[in-house]
Image: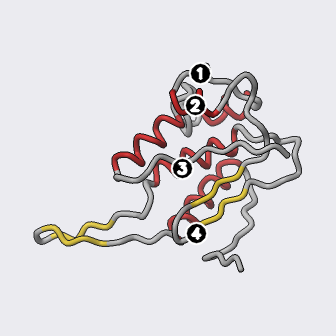
Amino acid sequence: MVEWLDRKDIHGTLFEIIKLTEEFMLKNMRTPAKVIGFKTEFRTEYPVEALREAIINALVHRDWHSSNAILLRMFNSHIDIISPGELLRPLKISDIMKDDYIPKSRNKVLVEVLSKSGVMDKRGTGFLRIRESMRKWNLPNPEFIEKQG
């Protein structure tokens, strides 16, 4: 049996979707606290920067011709972000993991809009930033999996 913490279909403009998705993730993430001296520090379970980058990547690089939705699934042990569409060839996951690729997008207009609004930088550094923020939090590297169909 599969159980999830919460479920929500998110609709709206691109900016509303990003904001509502971030709110949904923050609402459903554990936020453990640690007392250091006379201060209590709260830290979300996963780095918000990494999750935000992954969501923006899923939105901007998805295949908009597909009727499939982007899926965000939060489990006790991990988060899945599933975006319709294959990597643009000749790009491979191994290239992404080595930061050895030239950034490409199938949705150039979305990239321009999000870049001009300050949401993304269009330098192809998203996956690197995700991995770096996970590393800073002593979390394992994210898995990137490409499935056909």
First in sequence: mark 4 or mark 2? 4
**What residue does disc 4 label?**
75
Residue 128 on image: x %, y %: 48, 34
Q: Residue furthest top?
A: 102
73 sits to left or right of 53: right
Disc 2 or disc 3, which is closer to the eye? 2
Q: CA distance from mark 4 to mark 3?
A: 17 Å
Identify which amino acid the numbered label 4 is placed on: Phe
Whether pointer 2 and pointer 1 mark residues with C-beta atoms closer than 8 Å, the reply is: yes
Residue at 58%, 69% in the rendered image: 75
Disc 4 or disc 3, which is closer to the eye? 4
Q: Nearer the viewer, residue 23 or 46?
A: 46
Residue 15 on image: x %, y %: 65, 49
Q: CA distance from mark 4 to mark 2?
A: 25 Å
Indicate the quadrant where residue 95 lies.
top right
**What residue does disc 1 label?**
101
Residue 6 on image: x %, y %: 64, 75
Q: On residue 136, which mark appears? A: none
Q: Tag 3's secondary structure? A: helix
Whether pointer 4 and pointer 3 mark residues with C-beta atoms closer than 8 Å, the reply is: no
**What residue does disc 2 label?**
96
**What residue does disc 3 label?**
52
